[in-house]
């Protein structure tokens, strides 16, 4: 059934059930007064293809499901799945290149050193 994160309630709050979790590195993350579940997953583990390929985007449908084994008695058993659509994009390399900056700094430093040497020679 894809990637799963098992949760259970403790006296101090929600915790991850490692015996029912197949997601890598699943953890509960607190941001302000909200909590999120974070984990790593490969596209193949999520039932995705290799990604959008040569196109820039591709949409994938997922479902957040709770009480998948119907162990909790509820008045409405039909609201345990929530659809989520995620849009994937090709990886964009945003790491700037400093090669030109370092080269221009080296040239500037060299020109400054030559200028100082010439000024000292004139004096």
Image (cartoon, rainbow, N blue to C red):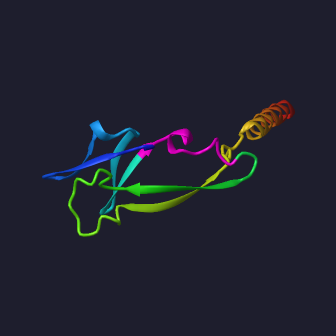
Name above or below for residue 77 compared with residue 93. Answer: below
Query: Residue 76's x, y, as percent?
Result: 28, 69
The N terminus lies in quadrant: top left
37, 17: nearer the viewer: 17
- 41 sits to left or right of 28: right
Q: Quadrant of residue 74?
A: bottom left
Q: Which residues are magenta?
A: 39-52
Query: Residue 84's x, y, as percent?
Result: 49, 60
106, 8: nearer the viewer: 8
Residue ranking furthest to the left: 11
95, 35: nearer the viewer: 35
Q: Residue at x 35, y 65 (%)?
A: 78
Name above or below for residue 77 compared with residue 25. Answer: below
- 38 sits to left or right of 19: right
Query: Residue 38's x, y, as percent?
Result: 40, 48
Query: Residue 37's x, y, as percent?
Result: 37, 51
Q: Residue at x 74, y 41 (%)?
A: 101
Residue ranking furthest to the bottom: 75
Q: Quadrant of residue 4?
A: top left
**Residue 108 among those drawn in magenta:** no
The C terminus lies in quadrant: top right
- 19 sits to left or right of 22: left
């Amino acid at each position: 059934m894809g990637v799963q994160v098992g949760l259970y309630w403790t006296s101090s709050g929600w915790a991850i059930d490692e015996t029912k979790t197949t997601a890598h590195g699943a953890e509960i993350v607190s941001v302000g007064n909200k909590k999120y579940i974070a984990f790593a997953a490969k596209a193949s583990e999520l039932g995705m293809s290799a990604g959008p390929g040569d196109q820039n985007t591709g949409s994938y449908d997922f479902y957040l499901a709770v009480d998948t084994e119907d162990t909790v008695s509820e008045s409405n058993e039909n609201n345990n799945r929530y659809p989520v659509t995620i849009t994937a994009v090709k990886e964009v390399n945003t790491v700037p290149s400093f090669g030109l900056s370092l080269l221009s700094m080296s040239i500037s430093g060299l020109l400054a050193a030559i200028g100082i040497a010439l000024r000292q020679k004139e004096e």
